[in-house]
Amino acid sequence: MTDRRLWSYKDIAAHIHVRPDTVRSYRKHGLLPPPDAVQHGRPYWYVDTVLTWVASRPGNREH
């Protein structure tokens, strides 16, 4: 089943236990996947996109 909820920087940050500014920095440096949607100029990612990205991150202990 696909999770089509959209997460903001704040949601991603809460999931990986960092500050939203850290997630913004990841995007700026190309470490975050491209957003799945942009609403009112703000990027959002599907939960599935974020979970896949988290699983593939270097140093991920759950992988």
Image (spheres, helix red, strand yellow):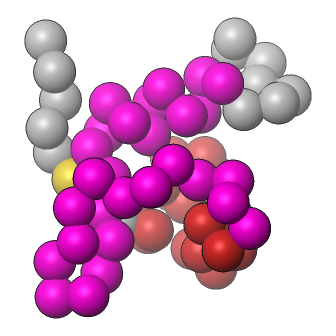
Instruction: Give the magenta part as a residue range.
Output: 29-56
Quick check: can you spot residue 19?
Answer: no
Q: Nearer the viewer, residue 29 or 59?
A: 29
Q: Residue at x 45, y 68 (%)?
A: 9
Outermost residue, bottom direction? 40
Quarter of the image for the N terminus: give it: top left
Q: Is residue 12 above or below residue 49?
A: below
- Residue at horizontal 72%, vertical 32%? 57
**Quadrant location, the C terminus:** top right
**Where residue 62 sits: x, y (%)?**
69, 14
In percent of the image, x 61 and y 46: which residue is there?
A: 16
User: How many numbered marks does the figure carry?
Assistant: 0
Image spot of residue 11 (x, y percent): 39, 59
- Residue 46 occupies quadrant: top left
**Residue under the point 59% across and 53% down:** 32
30 lies left or right of 59: left
**Per the image, is 36 magenta?**
yes
Instruction: Check if residue 12 falls in the magenta segment.
Output: no
- Relative horizontal placement of residue 59, taking residue 24 as reference (left or right): right
Q: Which quadrant holds residue 24?
A: bottom right
Answer left or right for 61 relative to 26: right
Q: Is residue 47 above or below residue 9?
A: above
- Residue 62, compared with residue 26, is above or below; it is above
